[in-house]
Amino acid sequence: MVKTYKILVLSPFYREFVKGIVDAMANDISEIGVLVHHNRLSEVSRYIPLGGYFSWVRTFTAERLIDATSRPDNVNVTVCSMTYLVPDGRNTRLGDAIVKRIDGLIEKNRLKFDLVQGHFTWPCGYAAVKLGAKHKKPAIVVVHEDRDWLLRMAGSPDSRFRMTWKNANGLVRVNKIDIPVLKEYNENVVHAPGGFNPSIFYPISREAARSAVGISGEQKVIFGLGYLDTRKGFQFLIQAMQDLVKTNPNLICIIGGTGPTWGELERQARTLGVDRNVRFAGFISRKELNNYYNAADIFVLPSLSEGNPTVMFEALSCGTPFIGTPVGGVPEVINSDSYGLLANTGSASDLAVKIERGLGISWDHARISAYAQTYSWENAVKPILELHRTLISPL
C-alpha cells in the first residue's frame, strides 16, 4: 500500500545501490523527488579520447549519473548542474553550495516534502540536514562510506562530518560493526544492509553467459568489479594471478570498472607477465553485468576497506561464490564457507590460496542464490521505511 508522504532524496547519482534503495522505497511512498548534483566540468571528458583516469571521470557525466531503467512513476529525478574545480571529497564548500542550489529549486518549483534523505555523509548528507532544519522537516543520512573513512572522519578535526551525524534526525548504516561508532553522535541509528535487484541479477546458464561476454572453452574464470582505486585491492588480485597461472595457465581474470588506478593496474599486469590472463572490461552496463557474474566460477573483491559492497550481493544472487576480505560488513554476510571464502586483508599470497581453493570447490550455486534473496532491495529498505514512519507525524 502506497503511503501518503513525500520525500526528497539528495544523492551524487541515481544508479546502482542508490537507485536500488529509492526504487524499492517507491512502493511505500507517494512521491520521491531525487536531486542529483552534477559538475558541468565532467562533460569535458567526453572530448578526451583517453582511458584510465578519463574513463573514470566520464562516469560522472550527466548521462552516466542517471539510470532511468524501469524507474517507478512516482520517482522524479532532477540533475542539479553546478560548476566547481575542486573534487567533491576535497571541496569543503560544496555542501553549502548544494544547499543553496537545491533550496532555490525548492522555492522556484514550490516543492512539497515531508522528509529529506541524504546519501553519503558528504556532501549530500550534510546538505540534507541543513535543508531539513531550514524547512522544519526531519532529515536522515544513509552512511554508505567505507569503514576506514568513517573512522578517520570520527577522529578528524574537521567537524563537518560529526556535526552531520549529530544533527540528523536519524542515521542508516550499511553494516552492523560501525553502529556503535555512529551512536556516539546520534542514538537513532538503524542497520540496513546493501542489496540487489532480483529482476536484474539472477542465475542463467554458464554457457549462455560466457557466450555473451566472449569467453569460449572450459577455462576457469575469475570476475572482479569495482571502482579502480587502491582501496578496492585489485593490485592484490593481479599479484595473486602471478602464482595462480603457474598451476592454471589458462585462467582468465576479468576486472570490470573504471577509476584512477586503471593504468597502473594494466602496467602491473604487464610487469608480472599476466597481461594475457587479465582483462580489463571497463564500464559494464547493468544490462550486461548479469552475464559477467554468471560467466564466472568465482567473484573476487580483495578490498582494504568497505561499508557493505553491493557487488557482493549481486554476485551471490547469481549463485556465484564470493572471495573477499573480512572488512566492513563482508563477514556479516559471508558467514559460512557455503557462500564464499575470506582472505587476509592486503595479502596477495593468502588471496591466491583462497582463490585456488575456491576454484576447486563444487559449490552449491542454488543454495548461494537462495541465501542472497534475504538481501533483495525490498527487504533491505524495510528499516529505512520504518525510520521514516517514526519521524513523520501521521498525515
Image: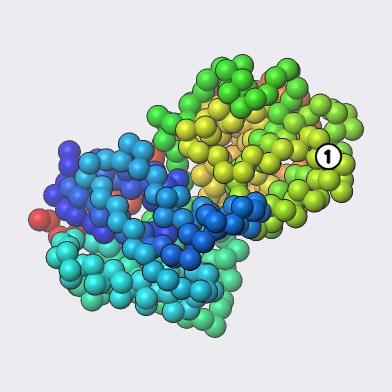
Q: Residue at x 40, y 74 (%)?
A: 95
Q: Quadrant of the C terminus?
A: bottom left
Residue closer to the observer: 335 or 240:
240
Helix or strand or loop: what does disc 1 sit on?
Answer: loop
Residue under label 1, please give it. Answer: 274
Q: Residue at x 61, y 52 (%)?
A: 49
Could you say where residue 146 lies in the image, as x and y percent from the top left? 56, 59
Could you say where residue 287 lies in the image, as x and y percent from the top left? 47, 33
Q: In the image, is 296 to the left or to the right of 160?
A: right
Determine whether 353 is above or below 203 in the image. below
Is disc 1 surrounded by few (<14), some (14 to 19) or many (20+) residues within 10 Å? many
Could you say where residue 364 lies in the image, as x and y percent from the top left? 60, 21
Q: In the image, is 109 to the left or to the right of 23?
A: left
Q: Residue at x 39, y 40 (%)?
A: 377
Q: Residue at x 54, y 83 (%)?
A: 157
Could you say where residue 256 lies in the image, as x and y percent from the top left? 62, 42
